[in-house]
Image: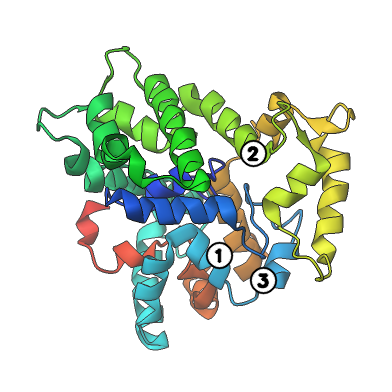
Amino acid sequence: MLSVGVSPAGSCAAVRRREMQPQSLCYLLLLCAGDILTKPMFRKERIRLDPELNTQIHEENQSFQMDHEAFLGKDEAMTFDQLTSEESKDRLGKIVDRIDSDSNGLISTEELTAWIKRVQKRYVYENVARVWKDYDVNNDNHISWEEYKQATYGYYLANPEEFQDAAEQFSFKKMLPRDERRFKQADLNGDLEANREEFTAFLHPEEFEHMKDIVILETLEDIDKNGDGVVDEDEYTEDMFSHEEGTPEPDWVATEREQFSDFRDLNKDGVMDKDEIRHWILPQDYDHAQAEARHLIYESDVNKDKMLTKDEIIQNWNMFVGSQATNYGEDLTRNHDEL
């Protein structure tokens, strides 16, 4: 996943792949139509900002609950919420011992970064393993485009008369060719049969270099509402916030407009093109795992030595339980020898 950070492929299809196993098309339709017809009133991020450069998000959400759900998913966050504070601290301490690879009692940025990357990689491949059998219908250890298409869109294709609503038709007509385009990009040998690695690239394109152009293109298509091939300032802000008539615009929207002008629109032509979108969501000099590690240390380092002791982490346990550094929803219930 973006992992640390929100996936730039923020479309209904991307959410569906990561959150759901194949289900009835009617259920998918409700999910996707809702994505088209309504937008949340809270701020949506496509990248995670480095807190040493911008602490606004943290200040707006001291409970970390939005971070927990964004990085873990609601189910995993809820799993940890069921523990008492003492149970949480005890289990956190055991994971800290595992992160401390040199056993010197201090957690460095490098150790925390390595742990986060390990957790991210495991999550990606476990996610693929969970859904593999649902798509590999003939059990040949490959997933063909036809298998995926039938599992995901078969009911719609066989019963188009049941989907007469314009929004419903738009949802499926948009998603199907997009999925096919992404599948073909992930299919390195062009045989329309995805092995495990190719299917992983299909589900998690942000993790693979040869899929980055697809991530950029899908992001552009999600935000570019007028279809002119670029993103203007209004489209940029509307992607994060849908203004409801009669309600005031949050202060941060004005800040985002300034961000668009000062940092997103690099050539100052009033719009973001593909290169500028790439720089925004997939900056070459930005390591998401390292940024999350720096974030955790920055917020928890009481003596400001840029290292964390177990005590410092335990004191700030409520933040760590929702971090990808620990991924509690899975780590607290699995055999840790796997790690």
Up the image or down, 264 lies above or below 337; here it is above
Alpha-carbon span between mark 2 and mark 1: 18 Å
The reply to whether residue 180 is visible in this rendering is: yes
Left or right: 326 in relation to 236:
left
Between residue 166 and residue 136, name the one nearer to us.
166
The reply to whether residue 207 is visible in this rendering is: no
- Viewer-nearest of labels 3 and 2? 2
Instruction: Identify residue for label 1.
Output: 67
Amino acid of disc 2: Ile
Residue 303 marker: 3
Residue 255 x %, y %: 85, 56
Secondary structure under the numbered disc 1 in the rendered image: helix
Amino acid of disc 1: Asp
Left or right: 43 in relation to 254:
left
Instruction: Identify residue for label 2.
Output: 281
Q: Quadrant of residue 242?
A: bottom right
Alpha-carbon span between mark 1 and mark 3: 24 Å
Residue at x-position 72% and y-position 35%: 226
Residue 301 x %, y %: 63, 68
Amino acid of disc 3: Asn
Q: Earlier in the sequence, mark 2 or mark 1?
A: 1
